[in-house]
Amino acid sequence: MYYIGCHLSSSKGMLAMGREALSIGANTFQFFTRNPRGGKAKALDVADCEALNELMAKNQFGPVIAHAPYTLNMAAKDEGLRKFAMETVADDMMRLSYTPTALYNIHPGSHVGQGSEKGIELITTIVSQILDMDGKTPLLLETMSGKGSEVGRSFEEIQTIIANCGNHPRLGVCLDTCHVWSAGYDIVNNIDDVITQFDRIIGLDRLKAIHLNDSMTPFASNKDRHALIGQGSIGLDAIVRVITHPKLKHLPFCLETPNDIPGYQQEIALLRSLAEKAPN
Ligand code: FE
Ligand code: FE
Ligand code: ZN
């Protein structure tokens, strides 16, 4: 059985997301921990978290992905901005302790002209502080497309952060199909090579989740424009090969395509039927 789902709005609470996921054939999902542009999170509702946990256990959900606000920048030049990122991540981690199947995903950051080496150093400082705190939630670094001054555009950059954090056991990676394709990893023609590279550089045991997106822009464009599955430069067949790959098929797959709920429902149904029909 595959874990396939999509990004959902958390505005109606945790249990409501679980119910919405079920209603569209999803057995995993992703949500923003707070307004994606930053700001204050809603008051923590422990009973709501527990109700979701119960629903997910009853319906055999896979891990779910909690996504940090994308405006946080752990590599910011300004110390105040870095402190804000650190405090927000710490607060999110505390909240996620009530959702034991959650993985916490964050964009490593943008070095904003300081150079990727400096960016990696600043990110490492915050990530290692966070991992030093009490907590059980895995922290995932997302592979990025390399737009602007983004850090995490290569497996090497991600691995350097992990190594600098002492290979902490709770540190993992979320691979975004649109981002790696845009960053120059040919998952359409050479998926096996990309997985082998990932394994050699980072280690496949660190890979905890996949974002499923097609791309509006061509291979190696360093852009970050998600397309509907089958309507971009990656294509439906390559996406199905990602889901059914023997080294990936156990992972949670989460769509972040430009969709409404009925659109997600259709994509999930399509991907499930093709994945289940595929050989292997
Ligand atoms: Fe993301
Ligand atoms: Fe993503
Ligand atoms: Zn993206």
Image: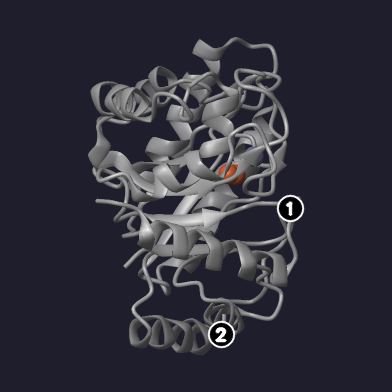
Badge 1, how many Cα within 10 Å: few under 14, some, many 20+?
A: some
At x 41%, y 43%, the residue is 242
Looking at the image, in which quadrant does ligand 1 appear? top right
Q: Is residue 114 above or below residue 130?
A: above
At x 35%, y 42%, the residue is 172
**Residue 147 located left or right of residue 180:** right
**Residue 42 located left or right of residue 127:** right
Residue 168 seen in the current view: no
Q: Is residue 197 above or below residue 216?
A: above
The residue at label 2 has a CB less than 8 Å from ligand 2 = no
Question: Which labelled disc corresponds to residue 216?
Answer: none
Question: Which labelled disc corresponds to residue 19?
Answer: 2
Amino acid type at mark 2: Arg
Q: Locate residue 250, reporting x and y percent.
A: 29, 56
In which quadrant is the N terminus drawn?
bottom left
Amino acid type at mark 1: Pro
Residue beneath disc 1: 258
Q: Is residue 17 above or below residue 39?
A: below
How far is disc 2 from disc 1 in space, using C-alphas?
Answer: 21 Å
Q: Locate residue 3, reporting x and y percent.
A: 40, 64
Residue in the foreground of this view, choosing between 89 and 197: 197
Residue in the foreground of this view, choosing between 206 and 263: 263
Q: Locate residue 18, reporting x and y percent.
A: 53, 80
At x 67%, y 23%, the residue is 218
Residue 28 seen in the current view: yes
Q: Tag 1's secondary structure?
A: loop
Residue in the foreground of this view, choosing between 112 and 215: 215
